Image (tube, rainbow, N blue to C red):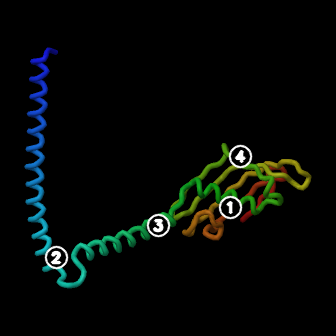
Amino acid sequence: MNNEEQKEFEEFLKWKKEKNNQAENENVAQLQTEEVKDNDAKEKSSSSCMGKGLGCGCLGIIVLFVFFAIYGSYLNNEQNKTVDWSEASVMSEYFIKGFMKYPDDVNFIKESKNVNEEGNGTFKITGRLKANNTFGQAVPYTYNIRIKYNGGDWSIKSNWTIVGGNLYNEATQEFTEF
């Protein structure tokens, strides 16, 4: 680039900078004018809204806060009323272990588990497990349990009810009803 082209380019940049400054100054002036108008309108509306007490803005914020507090507690209660199949599955294992002589030695066969939701928080869970008997041998069992969720924290046993079910010892061919 020769000197003449460089001077022309510098003049163009200078002109562009001045043009941007003029546009910014016009925008600032326009914004200031609009701000003055908005302030006048706010003063008029606030004086007519509530008088000497709380302003309309404060009242609006309080109303929104109350609304979201009520809505949040409603959502929290709704979430505590519903459970899914995985939570029911965990609780069914907890109940089944309670019927076993050696609950720490119970091994559930995950591939055999089937969970069906029957509605109204009731689940039917079927599957197989192996548990040690008195002699320490692993004995196969088949189980079938129906449990109902009553609300609250799903991981607390007292929030569930056993509706029915049985445990079948495949070695002795005996049923245990619950």
Numbered disc in front, either 4 or 1: 4
User: What is the spatial separation of the Cα atoms under label 4 and label 2, in whole angstroms?
Assistant: 69 Å
**Disc 4 target residue:** 109
Q: Is residue 107 above or below residue 41?
A: above
Asked whether disc 1 touches disc 3, contact meaning CB atoms under 8 Å apart, the reply is no
Asked whether disc 4 touches disc 1, contact meaning CB atoms under 8 Å apart, the reply is no
Residue 73 falls in which quadrant of the image? bottom left
Numbered disc in front, either 4 or 3: 3
Q: Position of residue 177 (x, y in %)?
A: 73, 63
Q: Position of residue 35 (x, y in %)?
A: 13, 62
**Disc 1 target residue:** 165
Say which residue appears at 79% left-offset and 53% top-offset: 169
User: What is the spatial separation of the Cα atoms under label 2 and label 1, in whole angstroms?
Assistant: 67 Å
User: What is the spatial separation of the Cα atoms under label 2 and label 3, in whole angstroms?
Assistant: 37 Å
Disc 1 residue type (three-letter): Gly
User: What is the spatial separation of the Cα atoms under label 4 and label 3, in whole angstroms?
Assistant: 34 Å
Numbered disc in front, either 2 or 1: 2
Disc 2 residue type (three-letter): Ser
The secondary element bearing badge 2 is classed as: helix
Indicate which disc, 4 or 3, sits on the residue closer to the N terminus.
3
* Relative side of 109 to 117, left or right: right
Residue 158 falls in which quadrant of the image? bottom right
Indicate which disc, 2 or 1, sits on the residue closer to the N terminus.
2
Numbered disc in front, either 2 or 3: 2
Disc 3 residue type (three-letter): Asn
**Disc 3 target residue:** 76
Q: Residue furthest right?
A: 135
